[in-house]
Amino acid sequence: MDKITDERIESAMQVARAAGEEGLGVAAYLGDELIVNTWAGIADTETGRVVDETTLFQVFSVTKALTATGLHVLAERGHIDYELPMARYWPEFGARGKHRITVRDALCHRAGIPQMPVGVTTELMYDWDWMVEQIASYRPWFPTGTTNSYHILVWGWLIGELIQRADPEGRSVSDFLQEEVCRPLGITDFHLPLAKEHVGRVTRLAADWEPGVDRDHLRDAAQPLSVAAAPPVHNRADTWLACLPGAGAIANAESVARLFAMLAQRGTFRGTRLLSPDRVDGFRVPRDDSRADDVIFEAPAWIGQGGYWLGGDLRRNIPADGSLPSVINQPGAGGSTGWAELETGLAVAICHNRQFVVDRKDPGFIARITPIADAVRKVARERGTNA
C-alpha cells in the first residue's frame, strides 16, 4: 500500500523520533476515507530493519477497544445485558462474593478485582483455562461497583470469557472478534493472537525505563513484573502468539484507525452497521464516580460506561480531563493510542515501538507523539473544510 501523508505529518514524525521514538505508524480516517497512512523509523534496532507498509506494532491496552467492541456487538444482538451479574453468563465467576459484579462493573474497571493470579508466570498467562479458573476463585479486593481500579491485564479475561460464554455459537474470543468485528469492517491487521506466519513483521519493543517490581502492592498485583506490558515479556514471540484480550493485540495503524472510524461514525463504516447510534452515544457517558481518583493511577481516569476512555486531548494530557465528551479513545501502555471524534468523524491511530513514561498526575504532561496528533488533526480540519 502506498503512503497517504502530508509534509506536516512527516515533519511531526521526525520531531517525535528526535525526541526518542524509534518506529512509528500513523493512520487516520475522515468518515469512510483513509486520509493518512504513513510510517517511519526503525522496526528493530538490533538488526536495523526499517518500518515499512508491512510492519506490525504491539498496541497494548488499545486492544481493549477491540475486545469491548466485541462485547457491544453481543449486546446489540440481545445476548448481553450490561446490568446483569457476570455470573448470569459465567456461573463459576459468582463464587466468593463476586455474584453482584455486573457486566457494566467489569467493563468500567469497577469490578474490584484488578489483581492478576498469585504466582502467575508468562507461561501460565498464556493458558486461558488456567487464567479463568483462577479469576473465578477470586475474592474482591474492593466492594462491587464502589472503586475505580483500572484492571490493567485481568480485564481481558473478564471480558473475553464473557464473550465466549454469551456467544450463541460458543466461539473463542479470538474467532468471535475476527468474524464479528474485524471481517465486517474489512480490518485485516488487528491480530489477537498473532498467527506464526506474521512473526517477522512485528517490531522489537523498547522502553524508556527498566521494568521492576512496583513497591506499591496494588499496582504490583495488577501488573506483576513476570507479565508486565513491557520488554522483555513482549519481545517474546510466544507472547504474540497468545490470546491476551486486555493488552496483547498486534496491529498496524490503519487497522486500528478503521475500528475507531466505525465508532467515529456512531457504529457504521462503509455501509456496514455494527452498532446502533444510540449505543455509541451511550459510550460517552462517564462511569460512576468518574471524578474520583482511580486507585491504580492515583489520579482520575476518564472511562465511559462502554469501557472506552473519554474526554479531553488524550494525546497531550493523559488521562483525559473530560472536557471533550465527543471523543472516545483508548490508550496503550507507553503511549500507543487510538481515538474517535464523534463530532468531526475523525479517527486516528498512532502505533510505535518505544514506550515512553506517562505521568498521569502531571496536568502539564505532553506526550512526544503530540506533534503527530496535532498535525493529523490540522490536516483533517482542512480536508473537512474543503470537502
Image (tube, helix red, strand yellow):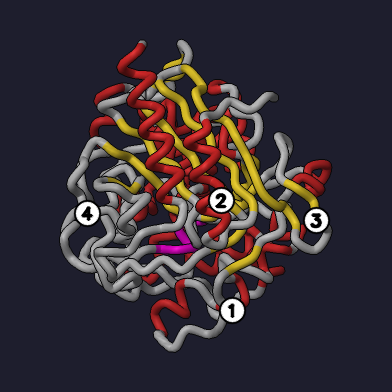
Amino acid type, callout 4:
Asp
Of 12 and 357, nearer the camera is 12
Choose the circle earlier in sequence order: 3 or 1: 3
State the SS at label 3: loop
Choose the circle earlier in sequence order: 2 or 1: 2
Position of residue 2 measured from the top left corner of the image (x, y, whole percent): 68, 24
State the SS at label 2: strand
Separation (CA) of disc 1 from disc 4: 29 Å
Separation (CA) of disc 3 from disc 1: 22 Å
Q: Is residue 155 magenta?
A: yes
Whether residues under marks 1 and 4 lie with C-beta atoms below 8 angstroms apart, the answer is no
Choose the circle earlier in sequence order: 3 or 2: 3
Q: Residue beneath label 2, please?
A: 59
- Could you tell me which residue is drawn at 41 percent across and 38 percent down? 375
Position of residue 146 measured from the top left corner of the image (x, y, whole percent): 21, 65
Q: Residue beneath label 4, please?
A: 321
Of tags 3 and 4, the one toward the viewer is 3
Specify the segment rendered in magenta.
151-158
Task: Say the numbered circle drawn on residue 48.
Answer: 3
Separation (CA) of disc 2 from disc 1: 19 Å
Q: Quadrant of the C terminus?
A: top left
Amino acid type, callout 3:
Gly
Residue 99 seen anywhere in this rendered image of the structure: no
Separation (CA) of disc 4 from disc 2: 22 Å
Q: Is residue 30 magenta?
A: no
Q: Residue beneath label 1, please?
A: 210
- How crowded is the residue under tag 1: few (<14 C-alpha within 10 Å), some, or many (20+)? few
Furthest residue to the bottom? 215
